[in-house]
Amino acid sequence: KQEVTQIPAALSVPEGENLVLNCSFTDSAIYNLQWFRQDPGKGLTSLLLIQSSQREQTSGRLNASLDKSSGRSTLYIAASQPGDSATYLCAVSMDSNYQLIWGAGTKLIIKP
Amino acid sequence: DGGITQSPKYLFRKEGQNVTLSCEQNLNHDAMYWYRQDPGQGLRLIYYSQIVNDFQKGDIAEGYSVSREKKESFPLTVTSAQKNPTAFYLCASSETGGAYEQYFGPGTRLTVT
């Protein structure tokens, strides 16, 4: 059974730092992996979607990488800003119609 | 503006009452989903629908019911049989299957006392 883990559960860094959030999964036969952002008490916003054949995706200051063989994905945030403070969740899908399997998220706080 | 709306934002009910949460989308998406989110846990799938008049149970369907009579609407009823209904409920939609990018509504926080 696929399990998705995000460690640490919380992270606090000073503004301006580059940082990496981690997502690991137990079954490497994924179809794709998605990263989402959630602000307190709000819905989720899709950040990046990486297909299983891709190694990385970039959007602005965000870069997500995927290493299927090791069961890992990282979300790199460059030059962090207080507005990046949120919970970041990753989710994997096992095939095109399969439902998403979610990690519990990493709560990120960027200190001004 | 295309998107997903959920109403109400906050909902309070007494134990033993059924309650229906609304979810509407104007993205012309075929698939819609209901998730439950509890503190410190990942999202858990309650029900999903890939086409009108069809839906499937997710991981935690017991005590919940849904309908999909229209493409744009996917209401969730939390019944009195749900043992621990207090949670944050999120609705989402995607073009087809769950592997495609999902778009989320703002959520409904349900408190049952």
Image (cartoon, coloured by chain):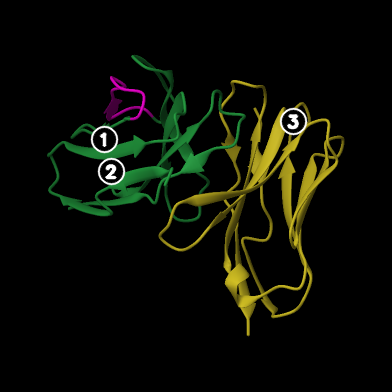
Q: Which residue is mark 1?
A: B82
- What's the residue type where badge 2 is placed? Pro
Q: CA distance from mark 1 to mark 2?
A: 6 Å
- What's the residue type where badge 3 is placed? Asp
Q: Are marks 3 and 2 on the same chain?
A: no
Q: Report which quarter residue A31 is drawn in.
A: top right
Crowdedness of circle 3 by 10 Å Cα count: few (<14), some, many (20+)? some
Residue B39 at what x, y percent from top left?
Answer: 45, 55
Q: Does the magenta stretch mainly form a helix, a strand or a loop?
A: loop
Q: Is residue B15 above or below residue B40?
A: above
Q: Which residue is mark 2?
A: B85
Helix, strand or loop at mark 2: loop
For residue A27, the mark is 3
Q: Residue furthest bottom?
A: A112
Q: Chain of mark 3?
A: A
Q: Chain of mark 2?
A: B
Magenta region: which residues?
B61-72
Describe residue B16's horizontal placement relative to residue A12 as left or right.
Answer: left
Q: Is residue A10 magenta?
A: no
Describe residue A35's horizontal placement relative to residue B81 as left or right.
Answer: right
Q: CA distance from mark 3 to mark 2?
A: 31 Å
Helix, strand or loop at mark 3: loop
Residue A43 at what x, y percent from top left?
Answer: 45, 52
Q: Are marks 1 and 3 on the same chain?
A: no
In the figure, the shade used to draw chain A is: yellow
Which residue is depicted at the point 29% across and 49% down? B86
Q: Report which quarter residue A29 is drawn in.
A: top right
Which residue is depicted at the point 47% across and 38% down? B44
Q: CA distance from mark 1 to mark 3?
A: 32 Å
In the figure, the shade used to draw chain B is: green
